[in-house]
Amino acid sequence: MNIFVSVGTDHHPFDRLVGWASDWAKDHPEDDVFVQYGTSSPPTAGDGHELLNRTSMLARVAASDVVVVSCGPGGVMDVRAAGRLPIVVARREPLGEHVDDHQLAFARHLETHGLARTIEDGPGFAAVVDEARRHPDRFRVEIVDDQPSGIAEFGRLADRLVWGS
């Protein structure tokens, strides 16, 4: 199974997510785990690269059975556009991973509306990735060609999150 994990491009380290992916890769050497780790420490198991250009990242998403990303809206939309249900991890301000906890609110909104699965800890990472291995159909979404642009869709989702409509 091919698993792609991306911390995104924010300059704050996200060692927590890289560590969970490394731990999972150590326990599952039969699977291919690739981590885009940004300013975080490199993974200690599996494979990885600091940054990927957009073309390479989208190719990895399309070729992966399981995709785990930080809960940035661009990454979430790219994963859904590739027909995958995003597995998201919110960067947390108290852990030095971001400037505030807006990703946490966004992740919970996505989960509530069935637009992503949310992971909040290491055991959750293992449980959701294991579920995706057993039931890959649960982590696929229909690709709809007539969806609004990413910017318009993000605006709609943000309005629903902020204003509740």
Image (cartoon, rainbow, N blue to C red):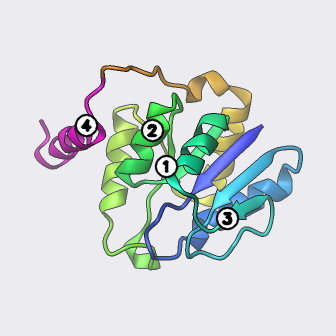
Nearer-N-terminus badge (4/1): 1
Q: Residue at x 73, y 29 (%)?
A: 134
| Residue segment shown in magenta | 147-165
From the viewer's perspective, is residue 98 above or below residue 102? below
Q: Nearer the viewer, residue 153 or 28?
A: 153
Pointer 1 with pointer 2, Cβ within 8 A: yes
Q: Residue at x 66, y 58 (%)?
A: 35
Given the image, on which type of amino acid does mark 3 rest? His
Q: Which residue is mark 1?
A: 88
Q: Which mark sits nearer the N-terminus, 2 or 3?
A: 3
Position of the C terminus, as image quadrant, is top left
Amino acid carrying mark 4 in the image:
Glu
Mark on residue 116? 2
Report how far apart the C-alphas of labels 1 and 2 lie in the structure.
7 Å
Near mark 2 (Cα within 10 A), the count class, few <14, some 14-19 or many ≥20, is many
Residue type at tag 1: Val
Rate crowding at label 1 as few (under 14), some (14 to 19) or many (20 or more) other CA atoms within 10 Å.
many
Task: Return the residue at label 4.
Answer: 153
Q: Earlier in the sequence, mark 3 or mark 1?
A: 3
Residue 123 in view in this figure: yes
